[in-house]
Amino acid sequence: MKPFKKLTINDRDIIQRFTMNSERMTADMLFANICGWQHLTNMGYAIIEDMLVMRGNMDGSLIYSLPIGRGNLRFVLMQMLEEAENLGMNCRIFGVPENKIEEIERAMPAHFDFYAEDSNSDYIYRRDSLVTLAGKKLQPKRNHINKFHRVYPNAQFLELTEEFIPACKQLEQSWNQELNEDDSYISKSDELTFTNFILDNFRSLGLRGGVLLVDGNVAAFTIGGPINEQTFDICVEKADTRYDGAYTAINHLFASSLPEQFIYINREEDMGIEGLRHAKQSYHPDMLLKKYAAIPRMSFGQSIFYNNEKMVPPPSNSTYKLKNAQ
């Protein structure tokens, strides 16, 4: 198998040559997310048979992305499994969209079990829905935004530029200190490392962002980037909760600032945090994009077993439940 190259910011054009032309909408495909969690995943990449494969290491197991491109999927999957076998390591393919399970099954029938990655579904909305907030269901959001602007009539929404980075970092630090670490599988230190990386490198990562100012203070900021030509991902959004409605306001203002080429906005997972789940559901997503881990049932004659409480089998009536799974 071709050697994997360690991923750096300088590889953006190479990675996006595959991701930007794909129909995949998962947050895992945003280049900034791939780079931003490098301190956890040690991600590398290889181009095999004109397909992009990313590989990292977590919890002593190899993690691979689902190959993306126009090559021979079966050949590339076999290369991945053979590499893990030769290295004597367990492996899994992460972030498999539900509509790609059949594709894997056609390439390698009855070779994988598929497990829903708990609290890891992406909330996806139509951009125009977040801009207009039309309809009775979103009336509370319109009311909240109107109240925010009544209470803070001098509030300004501006493009994120380097001059705002120190204030954004200060807000992130305060937000992070209030985070209840028990509510999420992401630690406070890892969350802080990720956000600071995004803030420090947002231009090199091809991102755009906005800040919400009240009396000259940063009340909220948000940053995101394109997953593909039609889907925009929000990878960071933080607000000072002392300003009631700041989250709702910056959500609306930033969506309104995005180019119309983006039909969908991916607001990522709820990470099992009840408050975050409620907030994302309150916008009535157009799609809850479930993602699966594909785990090989047998690796060249030797069973591979996992014990990860964060991953649960799909329901028994799932279209994608593996046939004859034991």
Image: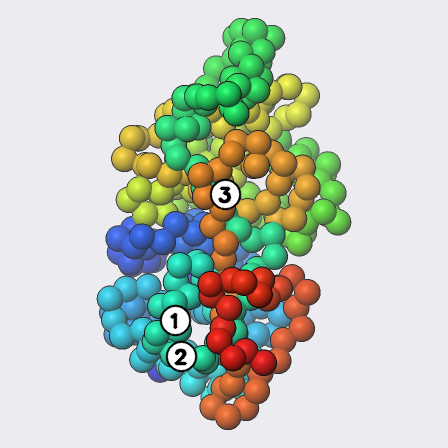
Rendered-image quadrant of the N terminus: bottom left
- Check if mark 1's residue and mark 3's residue have beta carbons within 8 Å: no
The kind of secondary structure element at disc 3 is strand
Name the residue at 65% across, 48% down: 272
Q: Earlier in the sequence, mark 1 or mark 2?
A: 1
Q: What residue is disc 3 on?
A: 123
Q: Earlier in the sequence, mark 1 or mark 3?
A: 1
Tag 2: amino acid:
Pro
Q: Earlier in the sequence, mark 2 or mark 3?
A: 2
- The circle on residue 109 is 2
Tag 1: amino acid:
Ile
Instruction: Say if 95 sits above or below 198 in the image.
Output: below
Label 1: how many Cα within 10 Å (few below 14, some 14–19, many 20+)? some
Given this view, does label 1 or label 2 mark the residue nearer the observer?
Answer: 2
Q: What residue is disc 1 on?
A: 104
Q: Separation of disc 2 and disc 3 at Cα?
A: 30 Å
Q: Residue furthest bottom?
A: 301
Residue 174 in the figure: left or right of residue 153 = right
Q: Separation of disc 1 and disc 3 at Cα?
A: 23 Å
Tag 3: amino acid:
Tyr
- Check if mark 2's residue and mark 3's residue have beta carbons within 8 Å: no
Viewer-closest of 104 and 256: 104
Residue 69 percent location from the top left of the image = 28, 64
